[in-house]
């Protein structure tokens, strides 16, 4: 793919990333408010695919100076094990990648989300706040 072709599709790529971040935030809110949703295998499968799409779309625009720091931060957040308010042995991205090979209710993704539910009643998860802010930042950059 040539750079010209990439630039021609840039507005679409930015829109995809904004949509991915919106969907991710909506799904997190749904997890927080409907705690039993993580027991729904279809929901877990969709959420895993959405995490993978979010990372893919962030990496696609990471080469552009205007969006580089935001895109890199999205990838970093998805690709870093959580350390606060609880310690996780895997990342959201790795949990999403391995989801299709695991039994849904025994998957790494399920266990991460279960820990999130346990701690989200006590405090906000910093990376989730960061992803919300990044959505707004990318929207402002694209305006």
Image (tube, grey):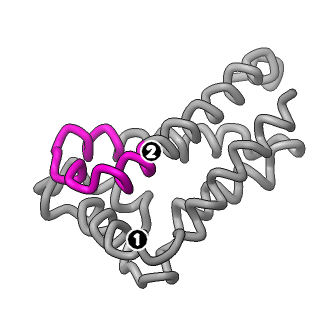
- Whole-percent x, y for residue 123 in the image: 50, 75
**Tag 2 and tag 1, C-beta contact below 8 Å:** no
Which span of residues is magenta-colored? Answer: 27-47
Of residues 82 and 13, the one drawn nearer to the viewer in this rendering: 82
> In the image, is residue 139 part of the stretch drawn in magenta?
no
Q: How many marks?
A: 2
- Whole-percent x, y for residue 67 in the image: 81, 44
Q: Is residue 137 left or right of residue 103?
A: right
Of residues 122 and 10, the one drawn nearer to the viewer in this rendering: 122
Q: Which mark is residue 52?
A: 2
Which of the two discs, 2 and 1, labels the residue nearer the N terminus? Answer: 2
Instruction: State the residue at coordinates (59%, 70%).
Output: 126
- Residue at which label 1 appears: 121
> In the image, is residue 37 part of the stretch drawn in magenta?
yes
* Badge 2 density bin: few <14, some 14–19, many ≥20, Cα 10 Å: many
Q: Which mark is residue 38?
A: none
Q: Please say if 101 is above or below 50.
A: below
Instruction: State the residue at coordinates (88%, 45%).
Output: 65
What is the C-alpha distance between the residues marked 2 and 1? 26 Å
Of residues 81 and 28, the one drawn nearer to the viewer in this rendering: 28
Q: Nearer the viewer, mark 2 or mark 1?
A: 1
Q: Is residue 55 left or right of residue 49?
A: right
Of residues 53 and 136, the one drawn nearer to the viewer in this rendering: 136
Q: Quadrant of the C terminus?
A: top right
Quick one: SS at disc 2? helix
Instruction: State the residue at coordinates (76%, 21%).
Output: 11
- Whole-percent x, y for residue 121 in the image: 40, 71
Q: Quadrant of the N terminus?
A: top right
Instruction: State the residue at coordinates (16%, 57%).
Output: 102
């Amino acid at each position: 793919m040539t750079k010209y072709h990439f630039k021609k599709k840039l507005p679409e790529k930015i829109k995809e990333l904004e949509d991915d971040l919106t969907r991710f935030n909506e799904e997190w809110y749904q997890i927080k408010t409907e705690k039993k949703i993580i027991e729904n295998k279809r929901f877990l499968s969709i959420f895993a695919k959405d995490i993978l799409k979010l990372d893919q779309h962030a990496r696609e625009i990471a080469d552009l100076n205007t969006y580089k720091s935001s895109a890199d931060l999205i990838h970093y957040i998805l690709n870093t094990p959580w350390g606060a308010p609880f310690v996780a042995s895997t990342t959201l991205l790795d949990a999403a990648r391995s989801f299709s090979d695991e039994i849904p209710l025994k998957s790494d993704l399920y266990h991460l989300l279960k820990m999130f539910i346990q701690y989200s009643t006590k405090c906000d998860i910093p990376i989730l706040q960061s992803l919300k802010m990044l959505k707004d930042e990318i929207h402002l950059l694209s305006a």
